Image (cartoon, rainbow, N blue to C red):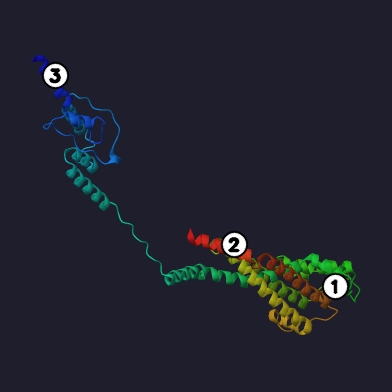
Amino acid sequence: MSEKANSASASESATEPIERPSGLRSDAAPDAQKASGPGTAQPAADPAPEEKTETAALPTSEPRRGRRSAESAGEASGGGTAADDPVAGAAAEREKSPASATKVLRSAEAAAARATPEPVAAPVADPADSKRRGDAREAALRAKPLGPRIVQTLLAVVYPFLLVIGALKAVASPWFLWLEYHRPGFPADEFGWDTAQRLTYGSYGVDYLNNAAGAGFLGGLVGADGAPLMTDSEVSHMADVKAVIATSFAAGFVLLVLAALMVWFLARRYPGGVRRGLFAGAVATLVAAVALAALAILNWGAFFTGVHGLFFADGTWTFQYSDTLLRLYPEQFWVDAGIGVGVLVLLAVVATLIATWPTRSRRDRSRIRVNGRRSA
């Protein structure tokens, strides 16, 4: 009886099912089912094939207590609980009831689907609206501010006066007088002065126009015979000429300072404005110079009289051929002076046009600088 009891006890122990995790499948399961009796508890149904995992078999002794200990440890650690992870909760429920686990899993998947935001379709741009906004942007980029445009125009107006005044300053100098007296074809003095005497006496007049001396600077000059070199009317006319020249040079200095300020302003606020202003001024100077040259060539006498009539009173600038001023500065001298002023102005205009000609590369550089300043 004792041996039969032990045999029966061993048979019961052998037929008792082994607890496994929900994802385990053992090859010994069919044998265990055959060996078990009708009252033996059946293991839970195997999960789907993709959820199966190979792992070591659990010990045969005290499986329930081990599972409870593992669950207690998981709850104590505070992570991986069914309340925190719906999928993990579904796996735990699957061990108890497959139907309940499936329901929980579907609920978790539905919640995840609701949490995922649906993609929003980008609005379709209206071609007409896009074109309208593009045209407005291009118009804004092409728009020129009023202030810099006014400064640019003023620079174009000032530039011709600067060129003419600078050329006058260059001609009213001792070097031009020396070139005139030594150039071939310059008329000689009909009353006996040689080139050295004319250069000496003529230099006094040029120096007087450029210094700060009074009318006595010329009134006290005497010739080789001891007589005064110039009459009172000649000295008075030279004083008038000096006043005009001094006013022109002072105005030129002021205009030069203003032009420098305008160039500085345009360079900082309006890229390309300096180039356009100087180009426009050079073109205007060229047009005016061509017109004046045409008038002088067609009728020099009328042109000479008209220029003097602008600055001097009638009767104060006409003299005899024997007077000192006409012996030192004959009519040919003034013709050559006008040509010298025109040549200097023309050279400056040509250099300016070459430096400021609106080529494509220069326009592109100006446009890039303008766009960069507006976007900054």
Give the amino acid at mark 2: Arg
- Mark 1 and 2 residues: CB-CB less than 8 Å, in contact? no
Q: To which residue does mark 2 refer?
A: 365
Give the side of residue 355 with respect to residue 301, left or right. Answer: left
Residue 42 horizontal/vertical position (percent): 16, 34
The residue tagged with tag 3: helix, strand or loop?
A: helix
Quadrant of the rendered structure where residue 216 is?
A: bottom right
- Label 1, label 2: how far apart the Cα atoms are: 67 Å
The residue under label 3 is 7
Can you give x and y, in whole percent of width and height, for residue 345 in the image? 72, 70
Left/right of residue 247 with respect to residue 150 in the rendered view: right
Question: What residue sits 70% from the left and 69% below the top?
Answer: 349
Mark 2 or mark 3: name the one nearer the start of the chain.
Answer: 3
Identify the element where label 1 is drawn. Answer: loop
* Residue 86 appearing in the image: yes
Which residue matches tag 1? Answer: 227
- Closer to the chain start, of discs 1 and 2, is 1
Q: Is residue 254 visible?
A: no
- Report the residue that reaches farthest toward the top: 2
Please say if 287 is above or below 49.
Answer: below
Foreground label between 2 and 3: 3
Report x, y in % for residue 221: 81, 69
Question: Under tag 2, what secondary structure?
Answer: helix
Query: Residue 280 at x, y = what percent?
Result: 63, 72
Residue in front for this viewpoint, 112 or 223: 112
| Disc 1 residue type (three-letter) | Ala
| Label 1 packing within 10 angstroms: few (<14), some (14-19), many (20+) | few
Give the alpha-carbon distance from disc 2 to disc 3, as whole Å: 105 Å
Q: Amino acid at mark 3?
A: Ser
Residue 325 disc label: none
